[in-house]
C-alpha cells in the first residue's frame, strides 16, 4: 500500500517555512517537520505554524545536522506505518509544484528512490555549482563510472522498507548526508530514478552551509565512500 509522508528538516528557517506552509497544506499529504535544535523564537514560530496547518512536529534537543533530522524523520515515518517519505528543504528552494509528480512516480516505481536532478538558473551561486561538479566526479569514481546523477539535492522520495536497512550505516549527519545515503543506496542495489526539477536560490535566503567545515565533511564522506565501495567490490568478488 502506498502511504507517503513529506519529511522536512528545519533549522531556523521560520520565515521561509511560513511562506511555503500554506502550499504544503494543500497537497493532501501528511507533513512531518523535524526541528533540528532551532532557537527559541524559531521553535515557537514553528510550533504555531504546525498547529495552524496540522503538521506533525518532532523536536531535537540540540542541533545535530540536516542528516540527523532526516534520519529521525525517516525512522518515525517507518515506525508509524508510512511506506514512502518525500524529503524537501524548509527554505523554499525546492519547487513544490513538482511534489505531485514525484509522488506519482514513487507510487509507480515503489521500490525506487526518486532523486531530484536539479535545473539551476542564474540565482545559483557559482561556488555551489562548482562544488556539485566536484562531488559528481567523486560519485562517478566511487561507483566505477556507473552512477552519474546529482547526489546533493535534498528533494527526493525514499521507499522506507528498503532505506531502513541501510539507515544505520549512514555515518554523516550534516551536509554530507544527502551524498552518502544516495551512493550507499546505489551500492546496495536500491534502484534510483532521476527526476528533473527547477531549484531557485531565494533572495536574502538563510543558508546554514559552512564553507570550511561542510566542505571538509563532504571530503571525508568521499574518502569513506571510496573505501566503502572497494570493500563492497571485494565482498562481492569473494562471494562470487
Image: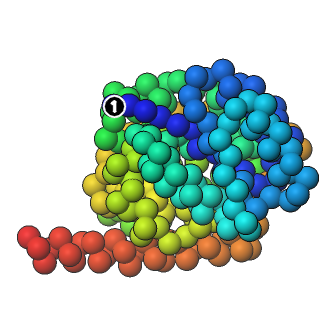
Q: Position of residue 21 (x, y in %)?
A: 75, 31
132 and 238: which is toward the camera = 238
Q: Indicate whether 151 appears above or below 55.
A: below
Q: Quadrant of residue 52?
A: top right
Q: Residue at x 58, y 48 (%)?
A: 154
Q: Position of residue 133 (x, y in %)?
A: 57, 56
Q: Indicate whether 172 appears above or below 99.
A: below
Q: Position of residue 117 (x, y in %)?
A: 52, 40
Q: Residue at x 53, y 24 (%)?
A: 100
Q: Which residue has dot 1 on it?
A: 1
Q: Position of residue 216 (x, y in %)?
A: 65, 75
Q: Quadrant of residue 205?
A: top right
Q: Indicate whether 226 appears above or below 97.
A: below
Tally of numbered discs: 1
Q: Quadrant of the C terminus?
A: bottom left
Describe residue 230's horizontal placement relative to residue 59 as left or right. left
Q: Residue at x 43, y 25 (%)?
A: 104
Q: Is residue 155 visible?
A: no
Amino acid at each position: 500500500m502506498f502511504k507517503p509522508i513529506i519529511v522536512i528538516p528545519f533549522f531556523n528557517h521560520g520565515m521561509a517555512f511560513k511562506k511555503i506552509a500554506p502550499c504544503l497544506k494543500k497537497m493532501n499529504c501528511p507533513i512531518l517537520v523535524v526541528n533540528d535544535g532551532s532557537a527559541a523564537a524559531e521553535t515557537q514560530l514553528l510550533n504555531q505554524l504546525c498547529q495552524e496547518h496540522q503538521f506533525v512536529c518532532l523536536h531535537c534537543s540540540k542541533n545535530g545536522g540536516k542528516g540527523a533530522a532526516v534520519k529521525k524523520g525517516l525512522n518515525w515515518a517507518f515506525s508509524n506505518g508510512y511506506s514512502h517519505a518525500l524529503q524537501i528543504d524548509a527554505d523554499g528552494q525546492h519547487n513544490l509544484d513538482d511534489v505531485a509528480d514525484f509522488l506519482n512516480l514513487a507510487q509507480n516505481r515503489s521500490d525506487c528512490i526518486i532523486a531530484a536532478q536539479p535545473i539551476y538558473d542564474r540565482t545559483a551561486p557559482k561556488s555551489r555549482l562548482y562544488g556539485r561538479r566536484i562531488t559528481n566526479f567523486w560519485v562517478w569514481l566511487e561507483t566505477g563510472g556507473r552512477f552519474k546523477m546529482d547526489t546533493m539535492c535534498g528533494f527526493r522520495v525514499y521507499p522506507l522498507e528498503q532505506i531502513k536497512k541501510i539507515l544505520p550505516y549512514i555515518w554523516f549527519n550534516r551536509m554530507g548526508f544527502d551524498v552518502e545515503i544516495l551512493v550507499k543506496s546505489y551500492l546496495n542495489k536500491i534502484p534510483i530514478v532521476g527526476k528533473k526539477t527547477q531549484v531557485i536560490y531565494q533572495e536574502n535566503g538563510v543558508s546554514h552551509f559552512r564553507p570550511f567545515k561542510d566542505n571538509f565533511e563532504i571530503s571525508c564522506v568521499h574518502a569513506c565512500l571510496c573505501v566503502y565501495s572497494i570493500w563492497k567490490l571485494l565482498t562481492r568478488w569473494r562471494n562470487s
